């Protein structure tokens, strides 16, 4: 046997062992833990892929013996497939960690249900990953899906599940509720990517993309494809961020804005000097929150919560009040970027707003229902009761529960503590106490949205 | 540019797979006279390379490859402008089918070499995913 064939056999055997492990790991976890359905689809894909890769490796070894002059190509092929498995390897463990004891499963179920009502997203599912980063991400599933499609040409046994998105939650936030509302923004990325890569392409997204190109060509003079690709990439990142914010707001209402402010504050990203700065990946907070305020005002939410005197609401109004003329762009702390990119982006904003409104028609949150249910929900919370209340035989919808609970969290935790701990009005509750009651409030809210979904879950399963 | 390393690596890997698909199809043709998927693969490669001549195609991302910074960077690293023209010309000839079989196989052999180099460079960049530095970004976004 030649050294080259021997080296190929060595590579192939190492990959064989690697996929064997992934297969076993997915098999063990899917039987020992309970997951939301989508994780099972992903695990099954990995197992089918493992089987297919092993079959391919056997064929590669035979091919190398028949055509030894192609050994280098075959080794590159094996390396490429191995690298795909390396990418998947980074996803498998965070998916396995996200079993139902570690994630807010009722919220995921609700988000998945709403996602299915979005134009073009029927049957879509979200796989949750727990990340060690204190940050919410949407794994760019389009890239993985495109790669999976190419891999399918070599490993036909495994077909990547359609309309499957990946959203990462920080592991520390897994069981909490209010900050996890941010996952709606990440689901927005999934929707944007899915509609962008659909066949035929989604008309609204195609229009948005050509508008980005038109707007950019009016300000750039570059003829370099590489430079143009970078400029498009920046504009597309900003576009997606605003798209995702508006998407989350349409589905959730003001609770999303409050959740975002909580996270930005937790991450230390709410610094006055940064409000107006666009980075290569994100629009300025002032721009984002001005879009929030605009949508919430137009859809009647700001009027519905006008009596809420929370600092979060004041902060939203304060940051969004910075005029667009003050916006700046920086590549990092030291390198200023071109303001004309910001101008090109601002020209596209009306198209993003219109697109989000179009695709979220039937999935949108309903301010009228919130106004109707807010009183009974908050009354239940004030008495320490899960707000699965009934009024005239009807139960509140999950979105009203979320918004009413969030407003309660922002304004009424001290009075809740006083009621149950018997503190005097002038006494300040301890941080531990505040934290404990916030946990309770989140649990009541989560239980209530689980209850509110039961009828639709059972009618869905017939 | 603070981007997700997985996203950058995915881009390099998708290019490696695109090149691999092209190489495998051409090898099947040269070694075994199999042409099952050759027309489609040649068209994908041709469409992607010709798409570089029209910047607006980068916003629509209709081509299979060369619509992202990572793909374009790799292409510039490994092929000269002349080689890119040669590849387009050879793919055009393979697509038109107006070559004698031996000539066709010679062209296919040369393309295997070019796309093999592209695949290997993409695999190298996958191992060393360098995000675009702020300085390079600044240069790329300068106007005249």
Image (cartoon, coloured by chain):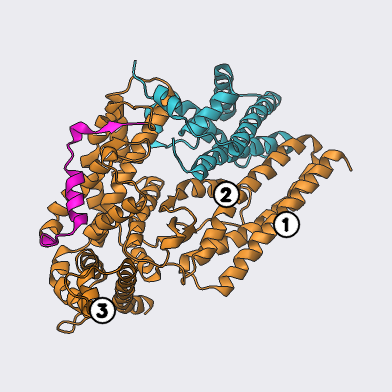
Left or right, A415 with reference to B50:
left
Q: Residues within 10 Å of mark 3 (few under 14, many from 20)?
A: few
**Residue range highlighted in magenta:** A304-330
**Where residue A87 is drawn, which disc sits there?**
2
Chain to which mark 1 belongs: A
Q: Position of residue A280 (x, y in %)?
A: 37, 35
**Which residue is drawn at the image coordinates 33% and 68% (left, top)?**
A435
Mark 3 vs mark 1: give the one in front.
3
Residue B13 visible to an observer of this rendering = yes
Q: Which is nearer the eye, A123 or A401?
A: A401
**Which residue is drawn at the image coordinates 20% and 75% (left, top)?**
A377
User: Disc 3 marks which residue?
Assistant: A421
**Where residue A249 is drawn, which disc sits there?**
none
**Residue farthest bottom in this picture:** A393
Left or right, A12 with reference to B37:
right
Q: Which is nearer the eye, A422 or B36?
A: A422
User: Dot 2: what SS?
Assistant: helix
Q: Position of residue A257 (x, y in %)?
A: 25, 55
User: Dot 1: what SS?
Assistant: helix
Chain in orange?
A
């Amino acid at each position: 046997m030649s050294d080259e064939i021997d080296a190929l056999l060595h590579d192939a055997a190492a990959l064989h062992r690697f996929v064997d492990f992934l297969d076993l790991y997915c098999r063990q976890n899917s039987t020992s833990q309970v997951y939301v359905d989508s994780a099972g689809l992903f695990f099954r894909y990995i197992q089918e892929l493992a089987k297919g890769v092993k079959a391919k490796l056997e064929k590669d070894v035979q091919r190398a013996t028949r055509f030894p002059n192609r050994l280098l190509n075959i080794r590159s092929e094996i390396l490429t497939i191995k690298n795909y498995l390396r990418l998947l390897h980074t996803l498998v463990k965070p998916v396995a960690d996200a079993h139902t004891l570690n994630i807010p499963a009722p919220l995921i179920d609700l988000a998945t249900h709403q996602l299915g009502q979005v134009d073009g997203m029927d049957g879509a599912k979200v796989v949750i990953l727990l990340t060690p980063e204190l940050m919410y991400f949407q794994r760019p599933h389009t890239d993985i899906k495109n790669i999976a499609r190419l891999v399918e040409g070599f490993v036909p046994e495994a077909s990547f599940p359609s309309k499957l998105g990946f959203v990462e939650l920080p592991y520390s936030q897994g069981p909490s509720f209010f900050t996890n509302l941010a996952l709606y923004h990440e689901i927005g990325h999934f929707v944007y990517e899915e509609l962008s890569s659909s066949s035929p392409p989604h008309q609204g997204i195609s229009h948005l993309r050509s508008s980005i190109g038109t707007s950019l060509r009016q300000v750039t003079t570059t003829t370099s494809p590489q430079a143009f690709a970078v400029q498009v990439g920046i504009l597309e990142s900003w576009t997606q961020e605003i798209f995702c914010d508006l998407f989350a707001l349409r589905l959730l209402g003001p609770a999303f804005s409050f959740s975002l402010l909580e996270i930005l504050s937790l991450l230390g990203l709410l610094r006055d000097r940064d409000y107006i700065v666009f980075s290569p990946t994100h629009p300025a907070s002032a721009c984002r929150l001005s879009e929030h305020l605009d949508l919430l005002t137009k859809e009647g939410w700001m009027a519905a919560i006008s009596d809420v005197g929370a600092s979060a609401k004041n902060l939203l109004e304060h940051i969004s009040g910075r005029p667009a003329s003050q916006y700046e762009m920086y590549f990092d702390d030291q390198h200023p970027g071109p303001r004309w990119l910001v101008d090109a982006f601002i020209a596209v904003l009306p198209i993003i707003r219109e697109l989000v409104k179009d695709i979220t028609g039937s999935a949108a949150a309903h301010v009228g229902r919130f106004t109707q249910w807010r009183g009974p929900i908050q009354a239940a919370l004030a008495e320490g009761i899960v707000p699965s209340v009934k009024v005239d035989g009807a139960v509140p919808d999950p979105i009203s529960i979320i918004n009413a609970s969030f407003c309660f969290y922002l304004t009424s935790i001290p009075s809740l503590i006083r009621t149950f701990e018997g503190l005097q009005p002038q006494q300040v509750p301890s941080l531990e106490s505040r934290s404990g009651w916030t946990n309770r409030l989140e649990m009541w809210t989560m239980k209530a949205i689980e209850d509110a979904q039961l009828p639709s879950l059972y009618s869905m399963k017939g | 540019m603070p981007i997700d390393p997985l996203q950058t690596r995915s881009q390099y890997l998708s290019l490696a797979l695109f090149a691999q698909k092209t190489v495998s199809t051409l090898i099947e043709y040269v070694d075994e006279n199999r042409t099952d998927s050759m027309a489609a693969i040649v068209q994908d490669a041709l469409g992607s390379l010709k798409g570089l001549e029209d910047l607006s195609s980068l916003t629509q991302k209709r081509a299979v490859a060369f619509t992202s910074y990572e793909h374009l960077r790799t292409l510039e690293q490994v092929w000269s402008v002349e080689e890119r023209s040669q590849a387009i010309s050879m793919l055009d000839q393979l697509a038109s089918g107006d070559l004698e079989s031996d000539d066709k196989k010679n062209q296919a052999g040369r393309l295997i070499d070019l796309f093999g180099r592209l695949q290997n460079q993409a695999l190298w960049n996958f191992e060393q995913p360098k995000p675009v530095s702020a300085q390079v970004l600044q240069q790329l976004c300068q106007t005249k």
